[in-house]
Image (cartoon, rainbow, N blue to C red):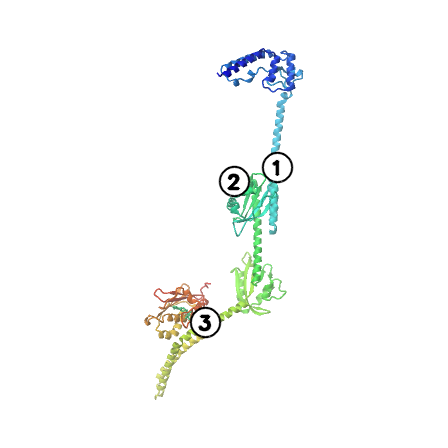
């Protein structure tokens, strides 16, 4: 046992014994002040005086208690001496006895209201009002509290219901306002709805962002309600820079529901930074995607405190987002329509077009001033279908039927649009060319046109220029033909000389037979038959020449390509043999007819044959073979002219450019003209090197009656 514990035990034992031997006055004093019980002023003094006055009598039990205290102190000292820690001894054992009081006496003396010192024992206590009634009072109060809690619960519930009802009413009202809203009022109405929602829900910010149509990454804030103000919001901005995570969520069609920035996932760090900068505490953002693709986002935020977004509220605000996105879509459609109308008007004006619309349901025509001017519609022809009927009446008689047929096809739905050029008899300026484009705006359930619109354009100047160009082309073609025939003149003279010689010698022989006596009539008849045949042959040559030398318009007739080739070969036969060229013909029998101009196709074949002969001019005499082939390829007839000449340059297309020539006396127009001839026949002409040397020129023409490839 440590020495200081032993000392403390002995000290305590001595103190307790003294206490037992001391009078009640001293114990009371020590009790009230020495044991650490809080003194209680006048009340303590009152008790002290009671003790002095009445001693042990009225208070009672003190002597026994003091003896008991002394005994307890001695026992405690023995425990400490036996090794117990002083602090383990209960203080009432160590601290001596507290005084006892008779409650009735205290009441009589008027000291009952004051509290006796702590630790005092009250004998014979009488319950007070509170002790008497505390349970009924507590029960009543508990009941009242329960009632109050119930009432508060009901009130809270009612407030919630009222709030929900107010939200539903507000959304119904917003929805009703947007139903028949003019596109020009949409923006104002959105901001007004944002304000009403924020006020009802205690929100601090509502913003609507729109995705740019041209640059999808750019978003622009177009509608804002922020009564508390705050740092400027970026508008327009690159969404992926400021709100990368939000952009991802919204584009995936997900809404953003954040009650506290602490909840935001780690990948949304940049978004959180921007929200924090803007002073935003809670976020609820809906994607606006009426047709599936995102067009914008509607965001509601708080700035003063964080807040939860209950499911019911989210559903209601989702409805608002839908109302906004539908209204915006309508507005954009209207704007797009107005823009395209403005563009159309500008285009119509720039292009010098006359515009008209016809409503066959209302029997009404709208035609602008330019339409009236182009068609020469007299003033006053504004009512009903007058303007349209006037225009139809002024069509050139040769073109009217084509236009009427086209119009009928458009109206009954066989075609969607008309594009036609016709001659028109303008009452003031005479005949002009008009290009007319028309389409159907509305059709009836049966497919008939109810509303049509169209434009007319005066193309007389272009048409004149085109006709002039056509004539020039014709002249050039003719010149080129004459030029080719000029090259043939030597052989042609020979071609003519031969039958003429035959005729001369036969005529001389006939004369001789007639001088005989009797004249040999039979022989003369045979000679005359030969003369007729030779004359016919000469006539044919002249006829072919005449046809080729003739200047004429393109006229497509059904013909056989083989006949064209044979005719040309006939013409050039003498020339080819003079040049030592052997012509080999491999013409497919029974080819179908093609639609072609006989003279122009002859010119085409003639040019290819003469070029082939030129290309072989330097070949050895035995190596000048010309091969002519025809064949049917699907619905086209193909002709090929092959030579064994010098071959083609790497870029064979160059040969078809006007004025490209490698010949000293060449014009370089032959192949260019050939191409325009083939194009006028809706065919193709091309050249390729032959694998065994030389060149092959192919041309293809569509079989007569096959659909026009263009
Ligand atoms: P031109 O005969 O007056 O030169 P073309 O237009 O008929 O005009 O021919 C242009 C050029 O194409 C010729 O000068 C020649 O160089 C080349 N050419 C045409 N046909 C052949 C061919 N069969 N083989 C090689 N080159 C050819």
Secondary element under disc 2, as helix, strand or loop, is loop
88 sits left or right of 111 in the view: left
Mark closest to the chain's N terminus, 2 or 3: 2
**10 Å crowding of disc 2: few (<14), some (14-19), many (20+):** some
**10 Å crowding of disc 3: few (<14), some (14-19), many (20+):** many
The CA span between labels 2 and 3 is 81 Å
Q: Which label lies toward us, 2 or 3? A: 2
Q: Which label lies toward us, 1 or 3? A: 3
Residue 214 in picture, x, y percent from top left: 53, 52
User: Which disc number belongs to residue 159?
Assistant: 1
Secondary element under disc 3, as helix, strand or loop, is helix
Residue 91 in picture, x, y percent from top left: 55, 17
Residue 451 appears in the rendering: no
Q: Which label lies toward us, 1 or 2? A: 2
Closer to the camera, 466 or 662? 662
Question: In the image as oriented, which residue stretches furthest toward the bottom?
Answer: 517
- The residue that mark 3 highlights is 477
Residue 483 appears in the rendering: yes
Residue 412 in picture, x, y percent from top left: 53, 60
Q: Quadrant of residue 563?
A: bottom left
User: Which disc number belongs to residue 264?
Assistant: 2
The CA span between labels 1 and 2 is 31 Å
233 relative to 687, above or below? above
């Amino acid at each position: 046992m440590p020495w200081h514990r032993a000392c403390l035990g002995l000290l305590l034992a001595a103190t307790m014994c003294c206490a037992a031997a001391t009078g009640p006055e001293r114990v009371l004093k020590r009790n009230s002040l020495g044991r650490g019980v809080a003194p209680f002023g006048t009340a303590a003094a009152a008790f002290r005086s009671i003790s002095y006055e009445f001693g042990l009598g009225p208070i009672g039990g003190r002597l026994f208690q003091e003896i008991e205290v002394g005994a307890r102190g001695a026992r405690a000292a023995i425990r400490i001496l036996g090794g117990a820690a002083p602090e383990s001894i209960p203080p009432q054992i160590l601290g001596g006895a507290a005084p006892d009081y008779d409650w009735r006496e205290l009441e009589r003396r008027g000291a009952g209201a004051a509290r006796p010192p702590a630790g005092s024992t009250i004998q014979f206590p009488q319950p007070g009002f509170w002790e008497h009634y505390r349970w009924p009072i507590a029960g009543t109060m508990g009941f009242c509290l329960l009632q109050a809690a119930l009432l508060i619960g009901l009130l809270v519930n009612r407030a919630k219901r009222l709030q929900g009802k107010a939200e539903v009413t507000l959304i119904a009202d917003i929805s009703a306002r947007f139903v028949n809203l003019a596109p020009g009022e949409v923006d104002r109405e959105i901001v007004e709805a944002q304000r009403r929602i924020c006020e009802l829900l205690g929100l601090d910010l509502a913003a609507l962002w729109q995705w740019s149509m041209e640059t999808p990454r750019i978003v622009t804030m177009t509608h804002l309600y922020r009564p508390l103000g705050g740092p400027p919001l970026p508008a327009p901005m690159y969404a992926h820079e400021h709100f990368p995570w939000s952009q991802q969520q919204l584009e995936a069609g997900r809404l953003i529901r954040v009650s506290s920035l602490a909840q935001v996932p780690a990948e949304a760090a940049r978004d959180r930074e921007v929200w924090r900068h803007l002073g935003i505490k809670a976020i609820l953002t809906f994607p606006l995607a009426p047709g599936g693709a995102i067009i914008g986002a509607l965001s509601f935020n708080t700035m003063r405190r964080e807040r939860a977004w209950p499911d019911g509220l989210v559903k209601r605000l989702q409805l608002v987002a839908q109302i906004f996105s539908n209204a915006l879509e309508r507005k954009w459609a209207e704007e797009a329509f107005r823009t395209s109308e403005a563009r159309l008007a500008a285009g119509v004006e720039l292009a010098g077009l006359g515009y008209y619309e016809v409503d066959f349901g209302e029997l009404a025509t709208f035609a602008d001033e330019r339409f009236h001017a182009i068609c020469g519609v007299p003033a006053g022809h504004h009512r009903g279908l007058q303007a349209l009927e006037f225009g139809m009446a002024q069509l050139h008689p040769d073109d009217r039927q084509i236009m009427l047929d086209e119009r009928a096809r458009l109206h009954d739905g066989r075609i969607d649009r008309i594009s036609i050029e016709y001659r028109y008899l303008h009452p003031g300026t005479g005949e002009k060319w008009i290009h007319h484009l028309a389409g159907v705006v509305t059709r009836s359930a049966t497919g008939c046109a109810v509303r049509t619109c169209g434009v007319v354009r005066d193309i007389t100047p272009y048409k004149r220029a085109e006709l002039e160009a056509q004539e020039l082309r014709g002249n050039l073609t003719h010149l080129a033909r004459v030029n080719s025939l000029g090259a043939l003149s030597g052989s042609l003279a020979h071609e003519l000389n031969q039958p003429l010689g035959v005729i001369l010698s036969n005529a001389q022989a006939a004369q001789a037979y007639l001088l005989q006596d009797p004249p040999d009539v039979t022989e003369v008849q045979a000679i005359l038959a030969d003369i007729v045949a030779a004359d016919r042959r000469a006539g044919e040559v002249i006829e072919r020449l005449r046809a080729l030398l003739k200047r004429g318009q393109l006229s497509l007739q059904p013909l056989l390509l083989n006949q064209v080739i044979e005719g040309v070969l006939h013409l050039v036969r003498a020339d080819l043999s003079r040049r030592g060229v052997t012509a080999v013909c491999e013409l497919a029998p029974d080819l179908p007819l093609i639609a072609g101009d006989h003279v122009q196709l002859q010119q085409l074949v003639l040019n290819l044959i003469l070029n082939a002969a030129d290309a072989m001019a330097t070949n050895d005499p035995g190596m000048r073979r010309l091969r002519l082939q025809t064949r049917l390829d699907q619905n086209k007839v193909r002709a090929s002219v092959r030579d064994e000449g010098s071959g083609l340059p790497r870029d064979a297309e160059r040969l078809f450019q006007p004025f490209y020539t490698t010949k000293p006396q060449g014009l370089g127009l032959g192949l260019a003209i050939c191409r325009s001839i083939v194009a006028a026949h809706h065919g193709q002409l091309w050249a390729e090197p032959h694998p065994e040397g030389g060149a092959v020129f192919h041309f293809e023409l569509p079989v007569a009656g096959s659909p026009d490839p263009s």
